[in-house]
Image (spheres, rainbow, N blue to C red):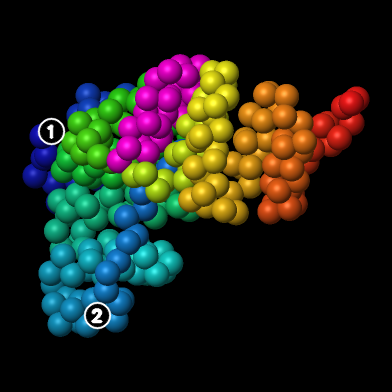
Amino acid sequence: MAITSAKNPRTAVTPQAVTTMLLVLAAAVLAGLTYSRNFTWRTQPSLWADVVKKSPGKARPHYNYATVLAGAGKLEEALDENLKSLAIYPYYGKAYFNIGAILQTWGRTNEAVKEYRIALALKPDIVDARNNLGYAYYTMGLADSALAEFNTAIKLQPAHVKTYTNIARIYMEQGRLADAARAYLLAVKLKPDYAEAWYLLGDVRLAQGRLADAMEGFGTAIKLKPGYAEAYNGAGKALEAQGRYADAMAAYRTAVGIMPDFPEARRNLTRLKSMPR
C-alpha cells in the first residue's frame, strides 16, 4: 500500500488504494457479532498520565495513555490522546485502530470504517482491526466483505476466538449450518470456557435437529454461566423437541426467572402451558 508524502494519512491513503484493499459495502444489522475495543489495560491511567507529562513530544506514551483511558471508560479523553499521538506521528496505525474502536462503540460505524482502513493501510497485520472492520461491514449488510476480513484475521492469528464466532454467526444467518458448527467447535476448542460459543453451538445443533448435541452445547453454557437465560431457553426448545415437556417447561421457567423481560422464553412457556395433555 503506497503512502504519499502528505503529513496526514487520512488524506495520504487514496480512495483507489483503499478500494483495492477492501470491498465496498451496503446495509442491514446482525446482532450478536463481537468486536474488540482494545480497551484492556494493565496499569492505572495515572501512571501513563505521568509518562505523558514527562514525555509530551513522544507518540507512544499518548497512545498507551489513550488505551488505558478507554479501558477506564473515558472515551472522550482517550480519543483526544490518540489524536495527540497522531499529531506527533501521523503513521501510527494502532492509534487509528483505537480511534475506530471508540467511534464504533459510539455507533459511528461509517467513521470507524474509515479509521480501520487507514490503520490497515499503514499496518495490515492488526488482527483486531481486521475483526472490527469485518464486524462493521456486517452491520452494514455486507456479509461477503465481512467474511473476507474475518478470514484474513484468522490467517494472521489462527487462535483469534472471537473471529471464529463472528464467522459462525454469518454462516448461521446464511443457512450454512455445518460450516457454522465447525467454526463454533474451533472456538470452544481454543477457549473451552467460552459460554457464549457453547450456547451458539447448541443453537446450530438444534437447527440441525441434532438434539443430544444441542443439549450438550446448552448444558455446557449453563455450567460455565449459571445465569445464562438464553441457554436455558435453548435447552427448553431442545427438550420440547424430544417430547420432554415437563423438563422443557422447567427450563423456560428458569429462563424467565433469570430474565423476566425475555419475550421468547415467556412465549415458549405460555405456549407449552396451553398445550393439551
Give residue 214's quadrant in the image.
Answer: top right
Circle 1: element type: loop
Q: Nearer the viewer, residue 76 or 205?
A: 205
- Look at the image and give the residue range highlighted in magenta: 164-190
Question: Earlier along the polypeptide chain: callout 1 or callout 2?
Answer: 1
Q: Is residue 131 above or below residue 213?
A: below
Q: Nearer the viewer, residue 37 or 250?
A: 250
* On-image quarter of the C terminus: top right
Q: Does residue 232 show up magenta in the picture?
A: no
> At which x and y percent is residue 37?
37, 53
Circle 2: element type: helix
Q: Mark 2 sits on what residue? A: 47
Q: Main secondary structure of the magenta part?
A: helix
Q: Which residue appears at 70% of the width and 42% of the height?
A: 251
Q: Mark 1 sits on what residue? A: 1
Q: Which mark is residue 258?
A: none
* On-image quarter of the N terminus: top left
* Three-letter amino acid code at the position of disc 2: Leu
Q: Is residue 132 above or below residue 83?
A: above
Q: Which residue appears at 15% of the width and 51% of the height?
A: 91
